Structure formats: C-alpha cells, structure tokens
Image: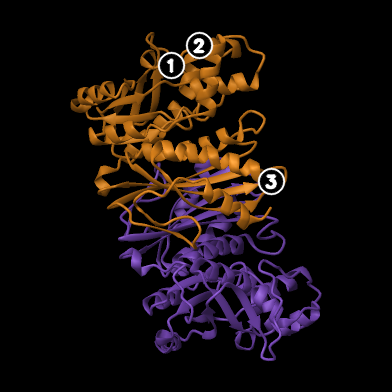
Chain colours: A purple, B orange
Amino acid sequence: MGEFDLLARVRERLSPPGPRVVIGSGDDAAVTVPGGATATSVDAAVDGVHFRRDQASLSQIGAKALAAALSDLAAMGAEPGEAYVVLGVPADLDEDGCLELVDGLEEIASATGTTLAGGDVTRAPALTLAVTVVGHAQEPDQLVGRGGGSPGDVLVLTGEIGGAAAGLFLLEHPGSDSPDADRRAALIARQLEPRPRLELGKALAAEGATAMIDLSDGLAGDAAHLALASGTGARIDAGALPVAAGVAEVATAAGRDPLELAASGGEDYELLAALPTGRLDAALAVAATAGARLTPIGELVAGEGVEIRRPDGTPVRAAGFDQLG
Amino acid sequence: MGEFDLLARVRERLSPPGPRVVIGSGDDAAVTVPGGATATSVDAAVDGVHFRRDQASLSQIGAKALAAALSDLAAMGAEPGEAYVVLGVPADLDEDGCLELVDGLEEIASATGTTLAGGDVTRAPALTLAVTVVGHAQEPDQLVGRGGGSPGDVLVLTGEIGGAAAGLFLLEHPGSDSPDADRRAALIARQLEPRPRLELGKALAAEGATAMIDLSDGLAGDAAHLALASGTGARIDAGALPVAAGVAEVATAAGRDPLELAASGGEDYELLAALPTGRLDAALAVAATAGARLTPIGELVAGEGVEIRRPDGTPVRAAGFDQLG
C-alpha cells in the first residue's frame, strides 16, 4: 500500500474543514483555533474485540468508531470540533476498503459538524481504528465531568437502552425470528450504527447537569463510574427504565431477564446525567421540544454503589461490563 | 486484564497535570484551557512494523512512541501540552509490562513538559500505540507548516542524520564489530531513544522559519514533502550533510554508500527548516547559544523535486522511504 497515495485519496473525500481549522490534514500537525476550553477523548476499535468484519460493513465500522468517540464529547456537553484517526490496516484490506472506512467516518463527521483534521495510516495485524476527538466550549465550567453529582440529584437517561446488546445477540444468532423483522433490523442498527447524543448533551449541560456519562459499558457499570467519581451511591428504579422495543423478546430467546439485559448491555451510547431536582422540569421540557426522550430513572444517594430495584423490591443483577452473546 | 484496575495503576504513575489541564485522565474526556492556537498530531507504532519487542525494552517502546509524536509538534514550533495514548495490548503482555510502557511514556512526558491527559486500553493482536499530541501557541501565525517556503530560502538541518538507520542495521546484524562499541551503542540509541527537537523547533519558528518538517521518513523523502507543499524544488549539498559518527563504517559493512544511507535513512527526528537567507545568521547564533548543531545544507529553488549532489556533481540516489537492513 502506498501510504502517501492513500492519504491523498482520503483527503479528496473529506468535507472542507470547519472554521476552527487553520491547517488541516497533510502537514506535520493540524493547526486549530480552539474555544476557551477543549474536551479531548480517545477511543479504540479493534477487529475481533469491538467489531467483526463479517457482521458490519467497513462504512459502518468507520462510522461507529467516530460515533463512539464523539459520544464521550456528548457526555461533556461539548461542541464537536475535530477528529484525528489512526488506521491500522491488515494485509487483506485494500485501498478501496480503506476509503469505504473513511466514507463511514466522514458520514458521521458531516452529520455532527466534525472536521477530520488529521490521521496516520499503518500496517497492522488486525483492522484497528484509534480515534481522537476534540470538542469545544467557551469556558471549562460549561463542560460536565462525571464527578460533580450530589446526593439528591435526580438521574435522567436519554433515549432507550438494551437495544445495542439485543442487536449484538441477533447478529451472533442470525437464525432468530423474534421479534419481527423490522424490530430485529432496528436492534441491529442500534448495535452497528449508534449516534452520539451531542445536542442533548449540550442541552443537559446548559440545564445544569452536575455529572454526566455516556453508556458505553452499560447502565449499571456507567452509573457506578458516575457515582464513584461523584462520591455518592445511586438508586435506580428498574420499572422506570426505557427499554428499547424488542429487547424483551430477545432476552427471552437468550434465556435472560429483560431488565438485566437492559441494565447490563453496553454500547447504547445514551447519556446518563445527574440534575438538581429543581432543574428536572426544565430539562424534560427542553428534551420534549427537541422531540427526544428523556426519562428520570432514579437518584444519587449518600453512600456508595449502585442499586437497581424492580417495583417489587428485588434487585436487578446487572453485571457492570457484561455483554450478551 | 482488568481495564479499570490497570487504568487506576497507570494514573498513579503519572506526573501531576500541567496548568492547562482542568480535568485529566479518568473522565469521559480531558478538559484543557488551550493556547490561542493548537497543533495536533497523531502517530501510531505497531509491533513488527515500527519496532520489535526483541530489540527494544517496553520502556524504550513507550518513550519512542511519544517522542516520535512530539517530533511533529517540534516541526511546527509548538509548545508541547498534552498527550493521549491508545494502548493495544496483546495476550502475552501483562499488566506490569503495560506499566513499563507507561514509564517510558512518562519519562518523555516529564522531560518535555507534556501531560499524559487521557487514554484508552484495549486488547489487540499485536502491541499497538496510537499517540495524539497537542501543542500550543499564542496564535496560529507562530506555528510553522510545511508549505510556506520560497525559492531562495536556505535549508537548515538540526543535529546529525543517518544514525537511526545505522542503529537499526546494527540491531538487525548483532554480530557487527564496527564501529567500536561506544559508537555502536550511540547509533543504537539514536534508533531506540530518539528525542524530539522541541526547543530548536520553537527557536527556528521564532527566527522566521518559513517551512519546517521533522525527519521521520528520511531527509530525501521529507525534503520532498516540504518542497512539494511549498511549491518549490530543493537542492541539497551532500558534502554539507552532518552525518552521525559511525554511519560511514556501518554503511560500508552494509555495502551501502554512506551519503545514500544518511539521506535515505528514517527516524532521526531532526528538523529540516527553510529560512529566508537574511535570517540564517541569527538562527545559527541561537543554535550555537543553545549548544545545538544547526547546519545549512542547501536551498529551495524554483521548480520541483529534490536534488542531492556530491561535491563532484554526481547525485546521491536516496530513496524517499528506504530503510537500511
């Protein structure tokens, strides 16, 4: 593979750089004029670990890698700015395949206003993407970490959960005929084509979120990260969880409890935020205006650990980092 | 491997974050207060492609990965700020091995004033490092790209070249007894322990460098990148090249012409800069004051392509991306 030829072909496919980018891809480094504060996150995706090339198109793999990285910026309430991509290319991936990956990256970049401002291409034993994303805010206080929550804050969750894990089960058990075909396709799309909740992240930050995290590991695990960083515990009402349509059927087929699946399954890339109770109504109104689902699911409490209880009081045994399959 | 336990142990080993870092490693994203302009670059290092674990210690591998990434910031004249590291860990690398890698990263981070502000750890089939570095300047004009050179600008080169390629040859031919042991060790150190020319990069930028690039691919190839980006050609006087001590002996042992080796060999991580002729004396004086070698080696010319000629007028046939070995 001619690294420099490939990079030239890659650059042809990129949208024009955003207004912050003074020098884009092709120099020793990209030069940008940042906001008063930046949020920066890195995220890796490796074939056989984070995806399987026989389950996802190259374009989907590229798109998901960038979407997952941007989800961390959503969880800070940052405005997305630039992305930098390291592509590790195995021997059986040709230049056209690399460009298909780039098309997936570019699809998410355009949709979110992110500039692909630089990268590096190398040979590697397995397809590997390492994505760095930089988001901006006017000042550091506008960005929301994990650690600012207090006992009494209400926990709100965007969208629906369990879909990505159910979709992964369907990919790994392709003979399933439950739920119906449309729902199966929707669940698989939740696994292969996640979208970062950037607008809701900014809205929740503006509405006074004290702590926020995106659900990459799963609700139980990520709630534990947020609570630990905030020095609190968390109590979650399993009956309130917004479980995606079709998850119950998949859980039954997998011999799993639907709520356990929804609370354990990773990669939904929804946002979990802590809000002072006085800010809840305003946040719900903003989400409703945006046509987005936002659900109060519990609260931060004094102490430590995460409890997820059903209406009958029994606990949901959600493993923090469990994957269905 | 417990990813979260490992990350906690990693964070214990890091120096306190620099003044720009508001939230460091451990949240969804790092939060920084950048300068008025940032330079950002990504660089990958993969076992079997960029290094071999039987030729370098894990600490050296970590240190070189960060040094190589920072070299791109040196080539912009940027002040180093933050680094973000994706670590792809193969099955045969244990947690202590990962921490040894981190020690190498931290060694270069401390030496250069860089904060390791975030990262990601994943399983991978081969040891893989993807390093993102962010450097700062007060404004974009202080950063030097590759494309600002003009015909007539003098080309200056920091340090000495050929050492890293000669060191690689010695690593791959361990029976060599020429040059002497001290020089062999010095050449091998040039290959395994490069140091980014950050201070000289800033000094050359301040002295009016119009274009600058670091030598990762080798002088011939990187001069071609600079000339192409500047819309010029380049003429280099091979007799003026500062060839590292011992390179001539290694080239002879390898059956190669020493000047071809010096002009083709990659990974010296020296800087090649274009300067208006009126700024040359001041730049040489600054380098001399810093105790650093800076050598005028040629000039940018109208036209295109890079010519490297010996004192007798014959060309040095330097492949752009050739590696000795």
Question: Which residue appears farthest toward the bottom when viewing the image?
Answer: A312
Q: Residue at x 52, y 62 (%)?
A: A69
* Residue topped by disc 3: B90
Which amino acid does the dot numbered 3 rest on? Pro
- The answer to whether A100 is drawn above or below residue B189 in the figure is below
Q: Quadrant of residue B178?
A: top right
Q: Does any portion of residue A303 appear in the rendered image? A: yes
Sequence-earlier tag: 1 or 2: 1
- The answer to whether B321 is drawn above or below residue B14 in the figure is above
- The answer to whether A173 is drawn above or below residue A83 in the figure is below
Q: Residue B243: which disc?
A: 1
Residue A109: x, y in percent? 46, 63
- The answer to whether B292 is drawn above or below residue A102 in the figure is above
- Check disc 3 and report its element: helix, strand or loop: loop
Q: Pointer 3: residues within 10 angstroms few (<14), some, or many (20+)? A: some
* Residue topped by disc 2: B248
- Check disc 2 and report its element: helix, strand or loop: helix
In this view of the protein, which residue sits in the foreground, B304 or A154?
A154
Which amino acid does the dot numbered 1 rest on? Val
Residue B243: x, y in percent? 43, 16
User: Mark 2 to mark 3: distance in Å?
Assistant: 38 Å
In this view of the protein, which residue sits in the foreground, A108 or B133?
B133
Which amino acid does the dot numbered 2 rest on? Ala
Question: Are circles 1 and 2 on residues that touch, CB within 8 Å?
Answer: yes
Q: Does any portion of residue B45 appear in the rendered image? A: no
Residue A187: x, y in percent? 66, 77
Sequence-earlier tag: 2 or 3: 3
User: Mark 3 to mark 1: distance in Å?
Assistant: 38 Å
Residue B120: x, y in percent? 56, 54
Q: Do the residues marked 3 and 1 share a common chain?
A: yes
**Total numbered labels:** 3
- Check disc 1 and report its element: helix, strand or loop: loop
